[in-house]
Structure formats: C-alpha cells, structure tokens
Image (cartoon, rainbow, N blue to C red):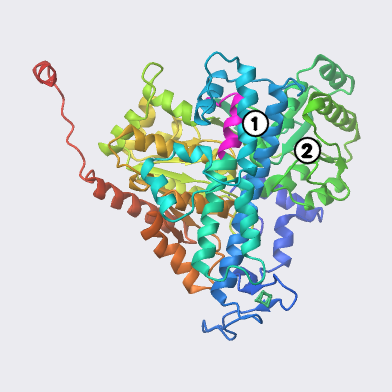
Amino acid sequence: MSNEQARSIDKATVELLEKARKEEISTVFSRADRIKPCPIGAEDSCCKVCAMGPCRLPRSKKGEQQERTGVCGATIDTIVARNFARKVAAGTASHSDHAREVVETFLKTARGEAQGFAIKDEVKLLEVALDFGIDIEGKDATAIATELGEKALNEFGRQHGELAYTKKAPLKRQEIWRKYGVMPRGIDREVVEIMHRTHMGVDQDYRHILLQTTRCALADGWGGSMISTDLQDIMFGTPVPVLGSINLGVLKEDQVNVIVHGHEPLLPELLVVASRDPEIKKLTEEVGAKGVNLAGMCCSANEVLMRHGIPCAGNFLQQELALVTGAVEVMTVDVQCQMQGLQGVAECFHTKLITTSDRAMIEGATHIEFHPEKGLETAKQILKMAIENYPKRRHAVYIPDHSRDIVAGFSHETINYLLGGLFRASYRPLNDNIINGRIRGVAGVVGCNNVRTVHDSAHIAMIRELIKNDVLVLTTGCAAMACGKAGLLTPEAAREYAGSGLAEVCEAVGIPPVLHMGACVDNSRILVAATAMVKEGGLGDDISDLPAAGAAPEWMSEKALAIGQYFVASGIFTIFGTTWPTVGSENVTRHLFEEFEGMFKGTWAYEQDPVKGARLMIDHIDKKRKALGIDKAGERVLFDMAMRRALG
Ligand code: SF4
Ligand code: MSK
C-alpha cells in the first residue's frame, strides 16, 4: 500500500495526493507528516491565559502529574475545564455568528433591501413566527418576516430570560435545564460569560465552569444553529430530497469550474442564480467553455446540494486537492474550515481564491466582499472572473474519474412527510417501527474529517456497523459527504448494507438507510427530529428516553465540541473519536463522562475504534429499549375482519 493509499479510503483523494506529491505541492496531508501533535496540547494540560505562564502540567509517562498547579495555584482540573470551555465558546460563536449574518440578510430581504433574495417558504415562516410568539393574525408575509427577523436578532443580545427555541424542547428537558441553571439567556451573553469566567482568576471550580459551558452550547444548538437553519429554509426553501452527485469527479474539464467553500449559503445561493444568467452563458461560450460548473465543498456544498442538487466536490480534507486538479478557475471561501494552505495550492495553478466575508481574509487571496444589498452583482462579478480565468489554465488538467449519485435533503419536515404522508404527516410510523423493533434506534453521526485518521474511514466503518444492526442514521457535515462517496446515500444502499428490519422500512418508504440532513448548523434538525419523536408518543417523555445516540468519529473543529456538548445536554449519549481534549484531568473527564449522566441523562464517551464506538452506541440503544419495555420483538399479528371490528 502506498503512503497515499494509507491516508484515505477514497480513490479520488488518493489519486490527487499522488499528483500533489509528484508535483511537490504542500497539502494538509504532507504538513501533517512533518508536524507531530504536541503531547501537552493534546491533553490540554497547558494554561496560557496570563503572562505568568504558560504553565504546563503534563503527566509523566507513568501518568503522574509532576506539577500539581500553575503559578497562580490553578489546578489541572481548572486548567483543563477552562480550555474545554473556551473551545465550546469558539464553536458556539462560529455557528452563531453565521446565524447573525443570516438574520441580518433575512431582515434586509424582508425590508426589500437584499438583491436576489426572497421569502420562499411561507409555511415555515408562519411556523417559526409562532415559535417566536408572534401574532400572525391579519399580517402579510413581509410584516411577519420583519417582526421575526427583529425577534431573532434580539436572541443574540438578550440579557435575561430564556431563548425562544428552548420552549420547543420536551417539557422534562426544559425542567432539567432550569434545575441546573443552564437555560441559555442570550447567545452572545453565554459566549462572553465563558470568556470572562475563564480569564485569569475568575471561575476556579471545574464543575461550575462546565455548567456555563453547557449553557453556552445550548445557546448554539437551541439558539444560533437552529435560527440559522430555520431562516435559511424560509429564504432559500426547506430542503426536500434531491438527486445530486459527489466527489472530485464532478469537476468538468471543458467547463468553467467554480467551487463554493465555507459555511454561509448566502452568496452561493446567488451564484446558482447568476450561473443561469444569459449574459454569463454568452461569456462562457466566448471563451470556448461548455458552461459554468458550480460545485460545493464542505458545508457550503451541503447547503446548495440540499436545495438545488448542485454537485458536491468533496469534504474537508479534499479542499486543497480540488485545486490540485488544475481545473478550478475560482474557489470562493467565506467562513470556517477553509485552510490557509489553499492559497499556496492556488498559486501553483491559475486558480483564484476569493475571500467573500468581511470577517475572513487570507493573505494573497483576492477579496470581494459579499453584501446582500448588491449580492447578485457580486455573484456575477465572481463568475465573470472565473470565465476570464478559464483560458489561463497553465497545466494539464487531471480530474479523477470518481463520482457517485446521492439523495440528500432530509429536513425534519421531509422526514415527517415521507413517513406519514401528505395528509397525516407525522413521526408515528417511525416510532411504531422502533417500537416493533424493525428499526432498533436512531443515531446522529456527524462532524468533520481529521488528517490524523484515515480520511472518511471511521465515518464509514461506524455507520455501516450501525445500519447493519438496524439503526437508522441521520448525518450532516463532512460525515454526510463521506457517506455519499461510499454509496450509503441511495435507497439501494438499504438492501446492500442495512439489516433486514431497517431495509424493509427503507424499501417501503423509498429512503436510504442514512439520511443526509445538511450542514453543521443543521444538527439542530436532529434535535427537532428527536423532539418530534418524543412528542409523537410511545418512546418516553424526554429525548434521553429515546433509543438514540450521537457520534463524531473524525471530529477536529471547536464547533464539533459545541455540537457534542449540546447533544449531551439535550440527553443524548455522544461518542467522539480521534482524540479527546480533557484527558489531562481525570476529574473533568469523569464529570463529563459519568457525572453528567446523573444530571443531564446524556453523557460523553470517547472511542478511537469506530466499530467499537458503534457497538457502544448500539448497547446504549438496547439499554434504552429495555427501559422502555420494547426490547422484546413484538409479535406480528395479521388482523382478520372480525379482529378489526372488535377494535372498533
Ligand atoms: Fe499559569 Fe495561572 Fe496564568 Fe494560567 S492563569 S498561565 S495557570 S499563572
Ligand atoms: S465543514 S466543521 S470540517 S463537518 Fe461544516 Fe466539515 Fe467539520 Fe467543517
């Protein structure tokens, strides 16, 4: 096996890694070979929050702590908890600042100030307005949207009370949050409070720090991320299942290739519109190209795939490799998960890397800022640059011949409709199939790629084990893309990979055994789906009662930790792979892995082996089935007419 083959289970990735090596192009893979992870940082036993440090408190090889405290007396527990809290704050801030941008664009759209945007889903507008307590009687869509935008914006700066969406959670869950004082007040406030509490000499009780960490994460899941998802749906349309394609083979040698990368779907939505403009089509023909081929990367890809079927070029570890093809005229990036290494790769080719957010610039890249007021103009300007760049390809193009069809776009609303039908849309059939044992349980497998593991391998190993054991998988982010590349996102995958019970249900409904629910912020859809299952009845009265579990087997970003923390605080058993950031403190780890169970009825776990991780999830699901009294397969009885009449 070549070095490259050992880095990824995806053939397109391996082929382009080989090309990068031969051409001496630096990528995340080659840099990871050079830079070994810092052992002290890996267990987060280093504090640098004041200039008397940094204070390093690593354990010896025998596991003993040589220094018990930092210079100020801070214990290893305080230091590790502070580091963890700051990561969750950064993750929450990232999702929520994305949400803020969405809300501001939403408000401009409602006021008629945003170019190219509209309110597309009026049904969802009404539903979300009701969630925010807006009186919709006698008001038109514009008035409701304006009021909703203003209320949503207030959620960020709110100082007291409870975030509006927390009322959507099961009542029992809300009571738990109130009992432990973790009900989020305002999104920004919870992030700021973590930064304050973790400043030198403030909160120095690890359990207390972790309570605020929980409150902050809940402000992400039941705040920023949920707002983002819902308002995007209202503006761009709630996703319905679409056929798309995935992997680097979606790039086209004879077309102008434009990749949208990052997280905010605002500009990408307008690039979709602009790419269909007759002027753009004419300019494309003039340079001898057969069209503009728009493709997505990372979560921007998930957004445009789910709503328009735009092809998805790849996930996190493939971003530089897309440019190594030599076929990309322009890559736009906005915020999050975009590597600075992209610019170095772009410089090896004719590719223009364009930063588009006022919050993110990359040295050497072209900066064309997106503002909703002239969004469509900006989109056209970018496409024109790409078209002009097409004749400047300097190298032979190499596009791996690997791409697959996928079905994506399973929003909560779609699952409701698909399972229950148009006239009785509900989660009843899902709950019934869980109760009768055809579906053993539900797992959310989400999150990133991490170059310290074999690209995509942990996602696929874990998910195959889950579906083989009749666990329906909901997926988002880079995990979803890994599934697409491995052929798990088509209805046919049910027959090939799923256990007989799950396959039977999937085939009856015509869905894949793994449902692609969107981007990172769309993990909020999983919370909504879990809540809908509870409210449907028969599976307990809280999310923690459900036979359900979560995982991020290849996580790398701070956002993943925020997601994991709000999953756990919502009552979901959650497993992370790759590495775990609190191993420096046994107390902090015990608190998160054991004591949380008693408090939040959900807990963290860490397991590097994805199949063992899946087994732990299945054990948890079985434990919950037993507690619900549905662990014995129900006898399937065929009702004759007399029995039906007796039912009344
Ligand atoms: Fe060291 Fe305390 Fe300063 Fe942290 S806050 S760097 S432990 S002295
Ligand atoms: S893009 S956060 S690598 S899922 Fe959302 Fe992928 Fe993780 Fe970024």
The extreme front residue here reads 160
Number of other residues with Cα within 10 Å of mark 2, as a class: few under 14, some 14 to 19, many 20 or more: many
Would you identify the image quadrant in which residue 375 lies? top right
Prevailing secondary structure of the magenta residues: helix
Q: Picture coordinates of residue 49 (x, y %)?
A: 69, 70
Amino acid type at image mark 1: Glu
Q: Nearer the viewer, residue 133 or 50?
A: 133
| Residue 378 screen position, x and y as percent | 83, 28
Q: Amino acid at mark 2?
A: Thr
Q: Is residue 228 magenta?
A: yes
Q: Which residue is mark 1?
A: 150
Image quadrant occupied by the C terminus: top left
Up-down: is 362 above or below 498?
Answer: below
Q: Write down the region rendered in magenta.
A: 226-240
Judge whether 162 appears above or below 207 on screen.
Answer: above
Disc 2 marks which residue?
332
Q: Secondary structure at mark 2?
A: strand
Q: Position of residue 400 (x, y in %)?
A: 69, 40
